[in-house]
Amino acid sequence: MATYKIRVATGNYLCGGTLDSIAITLVGTQGESPKFQLDRCGKDFSPGEEDEYVVQTEHDLGPILLVRLHKEPYSIFPQTNWNCSFVEVAGPREEVYRFPCYQWIVGYTTLELREGAAKTICKDADNQLLLRHRKEELRAKQQAYRYKEFQPGWPKCLDVDTVDQLNLNDQYSSTKSSTLEVNMAAGQVELKLKGLLDCKKSWNKLDDIQRAFWFYRSPASEYVRKHWDEDAFFGYQYLNGVNPISIRKCTEIPAKFPVTQEIVAKSLQKHTTLDKELEKGNLFLIDCEVLEGTPATELNGSRQHIAAPLCLLHLNHQEELVPIAIQLTQQPGPDSPIFLPSDSEWDWALAKFWVRNSTFHIHEVLTHLLYTHLMAEVFTLATFRHLPMCHPLYKLLIPHTRYTLHINVLGRVRLFSPGGLIDEATATGFHGLSHLLAKGLSTLTYSTLCLPDDLRDRGVESLPNYYYKEDGMKLWEAIHSFVSGIVCLYYPEDISVREDPELQAWVAEIFNKGPLGRESSGPEMPHCSYGPGRRGGGNNGQFDFGAWMPNYPSSMRKPPPKTKGSATFGSILDTLPDVSTTCRSLLILWLLSKEPGDRRPLGCYPAEHFTEEEPKQIIAAFQNRLAQISKEIEERNKRLPLPYNYLNPPEIENSTSI
């Protein structure tokens, strides 16, 4: 006789326990056991509990390779789902085998789990049982997770129409889902009660905008409201605002933006010139060319307008980045004047509004939706479809896919579908968004997503007071060290990468379903590892910087001016979003910035997918480095009038989940 001690852990989720009958079969190298009923005095399988059982077999089964969990009817009770965390088996010689699960088991079924050591397929080459297991697991997942085209030119996405069609393992927890619904309803009710959500008029004065979301202000949003119209703060936001990746060094003045020394002389110190500042590397450019040709929609019966401006910024001797010239089209000429800080107050203000509005579209559609949500979905699906649970890369990536499918499906239903919130709140509407996103994907490269490459390509590695860059590089290096440490454990040589067909299929699918097989995207596209950091830098501050609408307008109701001298305060109010559009855009920004509970910050891994000691040590080192980075950020922030906290590790979600 051989005695086995079995420990079964149930996830600590609402309704995570089950009343169903649970049995187990042990499968070892020397045979398999009969099916044993897991039952003891009292209630089994309660949320957050670990239950222990003892079973005996006629002979030693050898090293345990698999366990089968049989979920079956119990008496007259109805079926209940079960969230199983792990199964642990202690053998007759006190050897311990751990079987990670960390998933919901739905319905009456048998789930086969393999021992938790991470293994590539090459390590299973001599074991037909384990080869069969990993192939059957992938076959089932490829049937469950299929792609579809949501819009031409977009990355492919999961082929479901509503979140109710998702696998339960991919859905929000009940806590997160209910909190999101309450947040959305509360925001809508507040705006309706104030009579703002359905008001299609212009704002009478800017101060009235404070009435919207009065109770959800933050110290950062208040700082923005007080300083939004300052040129230095305008420039600051292209370093540390919600879209800190659009600015690049200007090494020569583009022919399409004919700025001369005479034009900007008043904005430069007397002892310098435009050419000298170019040579010193003190000039920077925001070029919104990608917006050219993007169709605009109608909002509240009024045709909206989209521009593709250029903005020249100067790093002055006070290390402030200030705008010194703005052109609102890509074609210079008499109908496209270059606006300057020396122009009238309202001419210059209107020009800056147009740049803000243009970078709003670029940020929300490309930086946010494309780079962080849609590309993350492709990585998630490829991981599920081509990497079995025992694969080291699956274990590495699975915590960073949590809830990504749910939020993306929800976005396609409520946010950026025809008639969704984006259609009601932004100048692009659905069709403009679709056009812009496809255009952005056509130019997406590995360098776009790789922080060191992106900073180098934009020539901004040495820009001072660029906290996104400083904190981002610390995170990049920490993540790179963590990922490299894990990968090198299981791929000690290049040949081990080439000989892993599961990994190669994963890479190929990301390439074909993400950038749609476009060679110019770069052969290294799938190796980007900065997703959580990019998302934190581009998502968490949306409401802080957008709660004061003039700082982040989502639409413009009049076309860009073709002459100077015509702008007035009244005409600006008639150009900025009306009251209803403002409120709808604020509702979006608030929901996207407010994490609805059940969050896991970067580096938090309560589910132990790795069971070996070496990867656990690498994870611990990563967590220690993140804690050190957090301390450095908090110490730096004490000296700043506006703390930059968006890349503080505790503020970054482990996955794209909202």
Image (cartoon, helix red, strand yellow):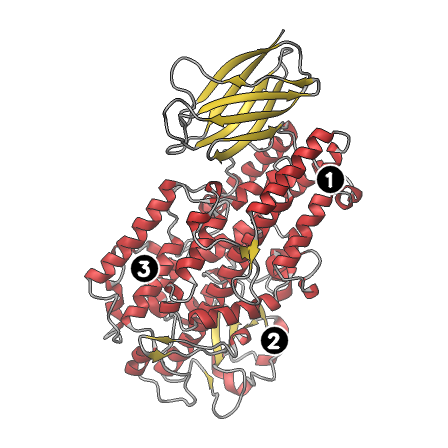
Residue 155: name its quadrant: bottom right
Residue at the disc numbered 3: 222
Q: Nearer the viewer, mark 3 or mark 1?
A: 1
Query: Please, which residue is most extreme toward the front here?
Result: 76
Image spot of residue 22 (x, y percent) = 48, 23
Q: Looking at the image, can residue 472 be seen?
A: no
Give the left or right position of residue 549, taking residue 524 as reference. Answer: left
Image spot of residue 116 (x, y percent) = 62, 29
Find numbered disc 3 in the image and state the secondary structure of the residue it sits on. helix
Find numbered disc 1 in the image and state the secondary structure of the residue it sits on. loop
Q: Nearer the viewer, residue 70 or 172?
A: 70
Q: Nearer the viewer, residue 3 or 500?
A: 3
Residue at the disc numbered 1: 491
Above or below, comparing residue 393 to residue 583 in the picture: above
> Identity of the amino acid at label 3?
Glu
Q: Nearer the viewer, mark 2 or mark 3?
A: 3
> In terms of sequence position, does the residue under pointer 1 or pointer 2 come before the other?
2
Image spot of residue 274 (x, y percent) = 57, 80
